[in-house]
Each structure stands twice: as C-alpha cells, then as structure tokens.
Image: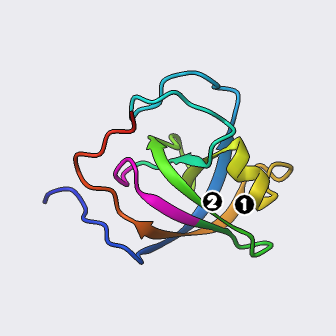
Amino acid sequence: MGPKRYHEGEKQHGLASWYGSENGRQTSSGERFDPHKLTAAHRHLPFGTIVRVTNRLNGLSVDVRINDRGPWGDGDRIIDLSSAAADVLQMKKAGLVPVELEVIELASPGYSGN
C-alpha cells in the first residue's frame, strides 16, 4: 500500500503541542524555523499545505503552513505548532490542547519551502 492521499476538506482530531525555542534551526522542509511565523510540524502532510487548526476548548482557529515533521513520540499529538500559532489559539499555558485540523489547501508534491 502506498502513501496516504490527503484531500482538501479532510479533518483530523487529536492533540496539539507547540515549540519555539528552536529559532533558526533548519526544519525538515529545509527552511529556517521562525517561531513568529504561523507554521507547524505534521508527520505526513505535504510541506506547504495550509491547515486550519481549531482549539476545541475555546473555539479559536489559526491557519498554519506545514514546514516541518513531527510531533514524535507516544501519545495522541497530531500537530506541533509554532509559538505564534500557539499564541493565537491561547494554548501556551495548557501546553497540550485538543484540536481539529482541516486541510484548507494541499501543496503540490514538488513544493519547496525555500
């Protein structure tokens, strides 16, 4: 069986975490991580894909661009958000929040973040 095919409008449910101390390091897509940009890490979605993330505790949403891989480890985390995206969702204090992801715009397979 080949890689999963994603489609616009697809939704996923799980936990979101956030990261911000890695400022300047290279992300999996090759671009530099900037905690002030609305970006995120996802295990499988193509780089450049735009995803709407909704905090299920307070209803706040933010659109982020996938530019990194993760989150890794055990648990139900499905996305790792930049510090700026976590601010919009008001989730920094909690650290982990239940979210809904909706694929808004799938990137083309040859997308390069540079």
- Residues at discs 1 and 2 in contact (Cβ within 8 Å): yes
The residue at 50%/63% (across/down) is 51
| Circle nearer the N terminus (1, 2) | 2
State left or right for residue 74 relative to residue 113: right
Q: Is residue 5 left or right of residue 70?
A: left
Of all residues, the one furthest to the front in this rendering is 114
Q: Residue at x 37, y 73 (%)?
A: 8
| Overall secondary structure of the magenta section | loop
Highlighted range, magenta? 44-52
Residue 44 versus residue 89 in the image, above or below: above
The tag on residue 15 is 2
Tell me if I can see residue 77 in this picture: no
Residue nearest the observer in this picture, 75 or 83: 83
Colour setting: rainbow
Place of residue 15 in the rendered image (x, y in percent of width and height, measured from the top left): 62, 59
Q: Amino acid at mark 2?
A: Leu
Is the residue 112 above or below the residue 106 in the image?
above
From the image, tell me which residue sits under label 1.
97
